[in-house]
């Protein structure tokens, strides 16, 4: 294979049909039903974090609408027009970058172009990515055609920041919120990719990659691509931890146990180990919060306490621990000495989770006071013996 012929995993494994989309079943079901029932709106807004499938979903929907004998839920993948839509070369499906085409003049040109009938498919479809980057004047220029669009025109908007899109635009669209993809689904897809690509990868290694991706399938595939370049045909968990400065799941749990038990010496010893091996302290804090949250959920499920961190902790104690870690985020991220800030955050969290909350103590004392028998008042003997 020539050097110019290589295609990155994120592009090579981009979904080619709705059934390939991972973690967005609610969106897929609604769009399929809209096609089946012939209830296709003129404007759609896809909202979600990066790498969750907004642009891919837009292309797949456009493919279903403009395929031969469409609209169809399962268009033929080998048709010329379907392939042109998926690779971005279809004349009737225009993908526009909202960041670089955000002026009123570009939107006016779009309005003029929309009046012409499609040349290949049934609809002329405009996919505007990062639509929140449009200027206010551009949004206002778009309003008129959104109010009364030609029958052959469909708009699909994608954005990571829906709050920046004018409410008058949003109200004219059907909005779909794409969720961050769960780690187990990302890991499952990565395992499938590795199997097809002939790559041996440890389950813990793929789990670490899924953790790093923060709910984004594209990010996970880009990380996997980099790990293949680093490791070759065999990816181990230690390699992923080394390249990205991650702390292992076992070390995260050990750190959480040291905090819960108040073992300050062990906390500092673990921080020194993280520092010596070049671990990312902020990422370690994020993973630690996720581990403590698991304990909180277990405590709630068990009726108010959990012992998974080596000591029995009430829901209140775990909540204080999690809140203390959360409050340390900004100090760790923007502080001058990251290691010192990390140590202080952990030691403070350890003290917070083991301290008695003042309001809880007051309630307990009040309950004890109320349970005590009332002391009888002494009789006034002087009043019973008149002088």
Image (spheres, helix red, strand yellow):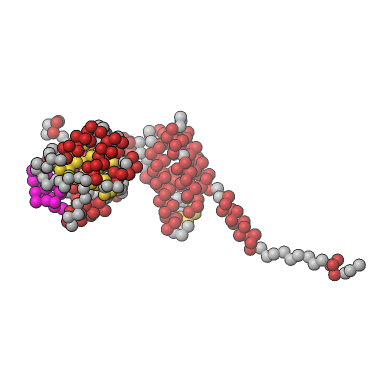
Relative to 43, is 382 above or below? below
Q: Nearer the viewer, residue 237 or 317?
A: 317
Tell me which residue sits at (76%, 65%) in the image: 377
Give the quadrant of the N terminus: top left
From the top left corner, tell me how far across and down residue 151 is, in percent. 16, 47
Q: Is residue 248 visible?
A: yes
From the top left corner, tell me how far across and down residue 363 is, in percent. 59, 56
Q: Nearer the viewer, residue 16 or 13?
A: 16
Tell me which residue sits at (22%, 33%) in the image: 106
Give the quadrant of the C terminus: bottom right
Apparent side of residue 100 relative to residue 362 in the rendered image (left or right): left
Inspect the magenta stretch and tell me whether residue 75 lies in it: yes
Apparent side of residue 227 relative to residue 262 in the rendered image (left or right): left
Relative to 199, is 364 above or below? below
Occupied quadrant, residue 159: top left
Residue with the most extreme right position: 387
Tell me which residue sits at (26%, 32%) in the image: 103
Tell me which residue sits at (64%, 61%) in the image: 370
Q: Please state the extent of the stretch shown in magenta in the rendering.
A: 64-83
From the top left corner, tell me how far across and down residue 383 is, in percent. 84, 67
Apparent side of residue 302 relative to residue 105 in the rendered image (left or right): right
Occupied quadrant, residue 286: top left
Inspect the magenta stretch and tell me whether residue 87 lies in it: no
Q: Nearer the viewer, residue 105 or 279?
A: 105
Q: Is residue 220 visible?
A: no
Q: Nearer the viewer, residue 108 or 263?
A: 108
- How many numbered marks appear? 0
From the top left corner, tell me how far across and down residue 296 is, in percent. 44, 52
Occupied quadrant, residue 86: top left
Helix, strand or loop for the magenta stretch, by majority: loop
């Amino acid at each position: 294979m020539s050097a110019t012929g290589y295609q990155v995993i994120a592009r090579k494994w981009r979904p080619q049909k709705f059934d390939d989309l991972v973690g967005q079943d609610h969106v897929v079901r609604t769009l399929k039903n809209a096609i089946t029932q012939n209830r296709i709106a003129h404007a759609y807004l896809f909202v979600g974090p990066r790498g969750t499938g907004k642009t891919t979903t837009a292309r797949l929907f456009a493919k279903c609408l403009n395929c031969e004998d469409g609209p169809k839920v399962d268009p033929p993948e080998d048709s010329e027009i379907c392939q042109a839509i998926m690779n971005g070369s279809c004349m009737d499906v225009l993908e526009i970058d909202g960041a670089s085409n955000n002026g009123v003049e570009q939107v006016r040109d779009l309005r003029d172009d929309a009046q012409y009938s499609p040349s290949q498919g049934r609809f002329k479809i405009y996919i505007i990515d990062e639509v929140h980057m449009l200027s206010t004047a551009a949004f206002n220029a778009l309003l008129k055609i959104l109010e009364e669009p030609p029958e052959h025109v469909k708009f699909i908007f994608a954005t990571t920041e829906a709050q920046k899109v004018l409410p008058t635009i949003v109200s004219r669209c059907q909005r779909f919120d794409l969720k961050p993809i769960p780690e187990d689904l990302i890991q499952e897809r990565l395992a499938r990719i590795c199997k097809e690509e002939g790559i041996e990868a440890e389950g813990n290694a793929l789990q670490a990659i899924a953790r790093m991706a923060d709910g984004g399938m594209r990010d996970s595939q880009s990380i996997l691509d980099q790990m293949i370049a680093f490791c070759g045909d065999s990816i181990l968990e230690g390699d992923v931890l080394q390249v990205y400065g991650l702390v292992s799941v076992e070390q995260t749990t050990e750190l959480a146990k040291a905090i819960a038990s108040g073992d300050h010496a062990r906390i500092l010893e673990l921080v020194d180990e993280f520092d010596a091996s070049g671990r990312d302290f902020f990422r370690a804090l994020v993973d630690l919060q996720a581990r403590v949250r698991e304990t909180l959920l277990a405590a709630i499920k068990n009726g108010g306490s959990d012992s998974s961190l080596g000591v029995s902790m009430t829901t209140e104690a775990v909540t204080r621990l999690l809140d203390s870690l959360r409050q340390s985020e900004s100090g760790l991220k923007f502080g001058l000495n990251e290691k010192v800030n990390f140590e202080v955050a952990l030691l403070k969290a350890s003290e917070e989770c083991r301290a008695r909350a003042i309001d809880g103590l007051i309630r307990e004392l009040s309950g004890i006071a109320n349970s005590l028998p009332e002391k009888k008042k002494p009789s006034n003997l002087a009043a019973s013996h008149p002088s």
